[in-house]
């Protein structure tokens, strides 16, 4: 008999930014690193004889939790990867839901029917992952094995092992670093427990049942959205400083037009379905010589603040510059904008220096790609 701990990877960028991450090989997040620490302590005294993982970064880094206290080689297996969503890879849920609502509804609620050109079907994932897990179990008869995979892939495996349809509402998507305890003998799997996340209790995570809004974005010419741009920047200024003293709408608007001229994807208007929710302004010329990108404005309208939605805007900016090959992203934050300072530091930005501004210090902050953001 083979004993198996089947583990979902830790929180990764796609989970946080609400982007499709299928085979897209994004990094883990600051919270993801803390979840890895918690998983390592959970598995510290558990006997493990062999370790396997999907070959995607977020899964391999999660497997590092097992290796922290177990001197084991890591075997990677491509067939343990997440579902390949083809043309949706690295795209935001909000964008895809707006453009293809029926297909997205099928993807989430009628999985057995899902068929998108260029993407895997759920049954493809179920067959390849079941074959991979069966081979691992048979190669490690009499041993205890840890296997790290992905949310949809594990759900497909549970569908196979429990004989349930993927459309069965009792079949869960496991939480990040959630454990399923399995046994394999005589060609059959037995599921002992599913989605055990008790090691995360000390992290005080938000209720996983609460679904966040999936915001969408549209690239816009600032001239076509001139009034909204000016009003958004003015509101951001007023929210930070409590006054419009020193605010020059036309200077910032002219800069936005230059940014758009340099990069047609620099100005992104954010929507909650059909309702305006915010704005992003990226200056891709600034810092290009030194390998960094610049965020000029990251703005959410007041009703959307304090709801953990700003990270979706930040994710768009970071992914934009990552795709461009920049090594880091920079911005400035006023010292009296304490909420923004906390937000950026929470998501991996560090203070580099400061200069004196009209209302006090302006901190130069930077996010470096490929670092451990803690």
Image (spheres, rainbow, N blue to C red):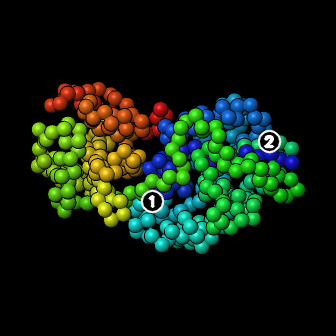
Residue 266 image label: none
Q: Residue furthest right?
A: 186
Verify CB contact (< 8 Å) between mark 1 and mark 2.
no
User: Residue tagged by mark 1?
Assistant: 93
Residue appearing at x 18%, y 52% in the figure:
231
Side of 299 relative to 78 (left or right): left
Residue appearing at x 50%, y 52% in the figure:
210
Q: In the rendered picture of this protein, how many numbered marks are placed on residues?
A: 2
Secondary structure at badge 2 equals strand
Badge 2: few (under 14), some or many (20 or more) residues near its Cα, within 10 Å? many
Side of 246 relative to 175 (left or right): left
Give the distance between the C-alpha atoms of the residues marked 1 and 2, in whole angstroms. 37 Å
Side of 158 relative to 227 (left or right): right
Q: Position of residue 263 (x, y in %)?
A: 27, 54
Residue 135, visible in the rendered structure: no
Residue appearing at x 68%, y 34% in the figure:
42
Residue 252 vs 201, above or below: the answer is below
Residue appearing at x 32%, y 37% in the figure:
340
Does label 1 or label 2 sit earlier along the sequence? 1
**Quarter residue 236 falls in:** top left
Q: Position of residue 60 (x, y in %)?
A: 61, 43
User: Residue tagged by mark 2?
Assistant: 144
Q: Position of residue 6 (x, y in %)?
A: 70, 48
Badge 1: few (under 14), some or many (20 or more) residues near its Cα, within 10 Å? many
**Quarter residue 261 falls in:** bottom left
Side of 201 relative to 134 (left or right): left
Q: Nearer the viewer, residue 262 or 253?
A: 253
Q: Position of residue 325 (x, y in %)?
A: 39, 46
Q: Nearer the viewer, residue 291 or 158?
A: 158
Residue 106, visible in the rendered structure: yes
């Amino acid at each position: 008999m083979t004993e198996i701990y089947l583990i979902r990877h830790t929180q990764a960028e796609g989970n946080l930014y609400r982007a499709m991450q299928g085979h897209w090989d994004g990094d883990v997040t600051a919270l993801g690193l803390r979840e890895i620490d918690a998983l390592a302590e959970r598995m510290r005294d558990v006997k493990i004889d062999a370790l396997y993982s999907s070959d995607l970064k977020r899964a391999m880094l999660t497997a590092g939790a097992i290796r922290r206290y177990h001197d084991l080689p890591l075997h990677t297996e491509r067939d343990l990867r997440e579902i390949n969503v083809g043309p949706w890879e690295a795209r935001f849920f909000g964008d895809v839901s707006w453009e293809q609502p029926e297909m997205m509804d099928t993807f989430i609620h009628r999985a057995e029917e899902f068929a998108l050109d260029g993407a895997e079907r759920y049954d493809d994932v179920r067959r390849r992952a079941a074959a991979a897990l069966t081979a691992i179990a048979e190669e490690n008869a009499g041993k205890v094995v840890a296997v790290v995979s992905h949310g949809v892939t594990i759900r497909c495996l549970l569908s196979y092992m429990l004989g349930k349809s993927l459309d069965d509402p009792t079949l869960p998507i496991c939480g990040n670093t959630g454990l399923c305890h399995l046994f394999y003998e005589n060609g059959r799997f037995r599921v002992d427990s599913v989605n055990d996340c008790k090691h995360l209790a000390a992290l005080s995570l938000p209720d996983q049942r609460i679904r966040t809004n999936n915001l969408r974005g549209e690239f816009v010419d600032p001239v076509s959205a001139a009034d909204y741009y000016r009003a958004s920047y003015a509101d951001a200024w007023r929210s930070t400083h409590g006054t419009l003293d020193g605010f020059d709408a036309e200077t910032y608007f002219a800069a936005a037009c230059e940014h758009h001229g340099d990069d047609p994807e620099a100005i992104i208007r954010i929507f909650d379905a059909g309702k305006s929710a915010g704005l992003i302004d990226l200056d891709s010329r600034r810092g290009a010589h030194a390998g960094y990108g610049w965020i000029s404005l990251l703005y959410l309208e007041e009703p959307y603040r304090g709801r953990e939605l700003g990270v979706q805007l930040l994710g768009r900016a970071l992914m934009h510059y990552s795709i461009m090959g920049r090594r880091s992203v920079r911005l400035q934050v006023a010292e009296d904008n304490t909420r923004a300072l906390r937000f950026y530091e929470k998501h991996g930005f560090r203070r580099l220096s400061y200069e004196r501004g009209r209302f006090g210090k302006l901190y130069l902050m930077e996010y470096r790609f490929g670092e451990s953001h803690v």
